[in-house]
Image: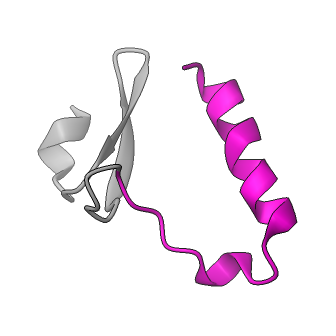
Amino acid sequence: MKLKDFIKELEKFLKISENPENIDVRMADDISVVKPFFKDGTVYITDIDNKNLEN
């Protein structure tokens, strides 16, 4: 999925939610998303906060 398409999908949730600031983002295996990062032209969505992944 391209980033632009992913953002469009997320924007749909913002529009239908009464309280978007209270929405938790989780991965399909029910693990909380901690930090997305960009590397080599791809956005990775992770459950860890590791600055070494960004390099």
**In this view, 46 is above or below 55:** below
Q: How many labels does the image show?
A: 0
From the viewer's perspective, is 22 left or right of 29?
Answer: right
Depth order, front residue of 5/44:
5
Q: Quadrant of residue 39?
A: top left
* The N terminus lies in quadrant: top right
From the viewer's perspective, is 32 left or right of 6?
Answer: left
Spot the residue most to the front: 29
Instruction: Report x, y in % for residue 20.
Output: 71, 75
**In this view, 7 is above or below 19:** above
Q: Which residue is drawn at 83% across and 65% down?
A: 16
Q: Residue at x 25, y 61 (%)?
A: 31
From the viewer's perspective, is 20 left or right of 48?
Answer: right
Most common SS among magenta residues:
helix
Examine the structure image and report whether residue 4 is included in the region drawn in magenta.
yes
From the viewer's perspective, is 7 left or right of 37?
Answer: right
Q: Quadrant of residue 19?
A: bottom right
Start and end of the magenta stretch? 1-27
Q: Which residue is drawn at 59% across and 19% down?
A: 2
* The C terminus lies in quadrant: top left
- The scheme the figure's colours follow is one colour
Q: In which quarter of the image is residue 6?
A: top right
Instruction: Report x, y in % for residue 14.
Output: 77, 63
Instruction: Report x, y in % for residue 13.
Output: 73, 58
Instruction: Report x, y in % for residue 27.
Output: 35, 52
Depth order, front residue of 49/47:
47
Spot the residue most to the right: 15
Examine the structure image and report whether residue 16 is included in the region drawn in magenta.
yes
